[in-house]
Image: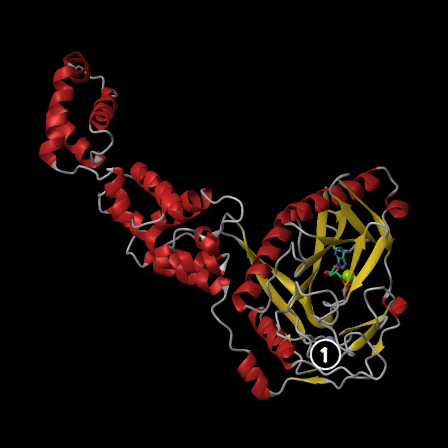
Amino acid sequence: MFEVVIGLEVHVQLNTKTKLFCSCPTSFNHRQNTNTCPTCLALPGALPVLNKEVLHKSVMFGTAVDATINQTSYFDRKSYFYPDSPSAYQITQLYTPIVEHGKLRIDFEDGSHKVIRINRAHIEADAGKNIHDGPVSKVDLNRAGTPLLEIVSEPDMRSAEEVTLYLKKLHSIIRYLDIGDANMQEGSFRVDVNVSIRPKGDEKLYTRVEIKNINSFRFIQRAIELEVARQSEAWEDGIYESEIVQETRLFDQVKQETRSMRGKEEAADYRYFPEPDLLKAVVTDEMIEEFSKIPELPDEKMERFVKDYGMSEYNAMVVTSSLEMAHFFEGMMQEGISAKNALTWLTVELQGRFKGEVNISNSPIDAKKLGFLVKRIEDGTISGKAAKEVLDYLMEKGGEVDEAIDTLGLKQVSDTGAIEAICDAVINANQDKVAEYKGGKDKLFGFFVGQVMKESKGSANPATVNEILKAKLG
Ligand code: ADP
Ligand code: MG
Ligand code: ZN
């Protein structure tokens, strides 16, 4: 009876070499407060200078989501005090964001699609970090002034599933464009979730709450579930008006609840005004020309995979969801194998064997090797079952596919003479079963195949075994 309405704000740290308004490096893991200068420390008299690389990466993003690029955009001051923000204001873009009116397509498992509108993406400066250390709190300003692109969606999502699909697509676009690391745990991809509910069929937007900084997909799903339950219960209990107020809430993973953090500020509370220390940001026609050159994106790659490899859209989406996966898959396909086998051996067998820190980008087996292993199944050298053993072996010991097959003695016997001899022996030893089979008990065929496979210690080519047994048993 209720419909869930969700809009997302995502802060993406742009991976520029230097900060937004000064030449301090953005690299992290440096000693605290060493990547700082008078500008990002907000010392009196220091003036900001806009980093052109930030414009470049923002335009790339805008191009990728089919948005309008505002070739002239402005910066604004958002005033608030926080210990990790020495200027007591944040430079952001309120009135004219650099990117507006984009769209992002999400793909469902059943092959259907939905377009989520992007309201805007604007440039802003990150704050430093407060480090709470027992009774002491410290401030590290290394991150202060790092460029962020805040990407704001329209309230177009209707379920936690759609949120996950949107975030995964957004994440992969950032990675494809290589404009940010987009690492949720490290805080370079930070998500705020705005949630409201409304009676089904109602077009009006009801009061939303904002749940801030949830750092995993699982927690985001859970926070939405909890918040939707809280709001619908309040509605059903007749206390919606008093209970559900516009506010910022925190997700507590231990207590499994969302709880109020602070009332929601209105824009006026921040005393926004045009930033007087900066000129307008101008993206010239030549810059547009240069900055809008972007690599193949997930959707395009997916469509190409569907066409070139005859895959379903969903499977193509699975392998194009990250650039690393897509490269790996295409590397395997160069061995001339079937897309179906490549997909299974990549997503089920290889990824199923990853443990701990191991993933596709530091896999102990490269694409060529895994592709070649699949080729050895397809050309009948080994069985699929044997290939799993070979993969275990290669992951542990390294080495080449053919060597491993020899070492493990797994080469499949396709030599008809040898298989025929085993079949004869099995038939002779089981005359009673042969009689039953000939008497109509068709199911026994599997028994004979099994016996032959067992006698050959799994090395007989099953297709050949089937063929010979069929001929011999009639
Ligand atoms: P602010 O910056 O104050 O958080 P914005 O106008 O930028 O406000 O909107 C923040 C987000 O809230 C957007 O992603 C928008 O889609 C979403 N949103 C707005 N109204 C609702 C609503 N009623 N329910 C759910 N999400 C909403
Ligand atoms: Mg907000
Ligand atoms: Zn600096």
Q: Position of residue 424 (x, y in %)?
A: 11, 23
Q: In front: 21, or 155?
A: 21
Q: Residue furthest left?
A: 417
Residue at image location 16% in from the left, 33% down from the top: 467
In the depicted structure, whether residue 404 falls above or below residue 61: above
Left/right of residue 338 with respect to residue 213 in the rendered view: left
Q: Quadrant of ligand 1?
A: bottom right
Viewport quadrant of the C terminus: top left
| Label 1 beta carbon less than 8 Å to ligand 3 | yes
- Amino acid type shown at disc 1: Phe
In the depicted structure, whether residue 454 falls above or below residue 358: above
- On the image, which quarter does residue 148 sit in? bottom right
Viewport quadrant of the N terminus: top right
Q: Which residue is mark 1?
A: 21
Residue at image location 30% in from the left, 48% down from the top: 373
- The secondary element bearing badge 1 is classed as loop
Q: Position of residue 362 (x, y in %)?
A: 47, 54
Q: In front: 441, or 395?
A: 395
Q: In front: 29, or 353?
A: 29
Q: Residue furthest front?
A: 31
Could one spot residue 436 in this view of the protein? yes
Q: How busy is the neighbourhood of tag 1: few (under 14 within 10 Å), some, or many (20 plus)? A: many
In the depicted structure, whether residue 404 falls above or below residue 125: above
Figure colour scheme: secondary structure
In the depicted structure, whether residue 75 falls above or below residue 405: below
Residue at image location 80% in from the left, 52% down from the top: 133
- On the image, which quarter does residue 28 sit in? bottom right
Could one spot residue 208 in this view of the protein? no
Left/right of residue 241 with respect to residue 426 in the rendered view: right
Q: Position of residue 266 (x, y in %)?
A: 87, 64
Tally the numbered discs: 1
Left/right of residue 288 with respect to residue 430 in the rendered view: right
